[in-house]
Image: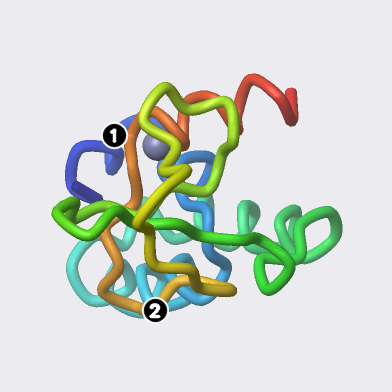
Amino acid sequence: MLQVYVRFGNVVECLCELDDAELFLTRAKRFYPLATSYIDEGIRLAGKSFDASQIEYRKTAVGESWHFSSNCSQWPTVNFALSKGASDNSILCNECVIKSRIVNA
Ligand SMILES: [Zn+2]
């Protein structure tokens, strides 16, 4: 899903996990140098105001994406897996990303 957000410098706003952003920055330096300044800035801002390790992630038994916003219409309430923080290859729910941006705006 990351490639969708590579345009216009909004990439880091859509990333929810600082580790992901840093991994992405490493890749961007190789493959998309123009984006690195935006990602650097995003990591800097994220480090100030966002502690990803405090986020609770939930995933349904059949779902592939992790949810982290209780405002999400698909927020799992039964039969879900629980995780603190997301691993590097986690797929995050798009709706959660959008809702978290609204809440934090
Ligand atoms: Zn969700």
Near-viewer residue (74 or 5) = 74
- Residue 10 seen in render: no
Residue 95 in the figure: left or right of residue 3: right
Q: Quadrant of ligand 1?
A: top left
Q: Tag 2 or tag 1, which sits nearer the N-term? A: 1
Q: In this view, which residue lies farthest toward the right?
A: 48
Per the image, the residue denoted by label 2 is: 87
Q: Amino acid at mark 1?
A: Arg
Residue 87 in the figure: left or right of residue 103: left
> What is the secondary structure assignment of the residue under circle 1?
helix
Q: Are marks 1 and 2 in contact (CB under 8 Å)?
A: no
Q: CA distance from mark 1 to mark 2?
A: 24 Å
Q: Position of residue 7 (x, y in %)?
A: 29, 34
Q: Is residue 30 above or below residue 72?
A: below
Per the image, the residue denoted by label 1 is: 7
Q: Position of residue 72 (x, y in %)?
A: 47, 28
Residue 49 in the figure: left or right of residue 70: right
Q: Amino acid at mark 2?
A: Ser
How crowded pointer 1 is (Cα within 10 Å; few <14, some 14-19, many 20+) is rated as few
- Residue 38 seen in render: yes
> What is the secondary structure assignment of the residue under circle 2?
loop
Near-viewer residue (59 or 4) = 59
Mark number, residue 88: none
Which residue is painted at 20% across and 37% down in the image?
A: 4
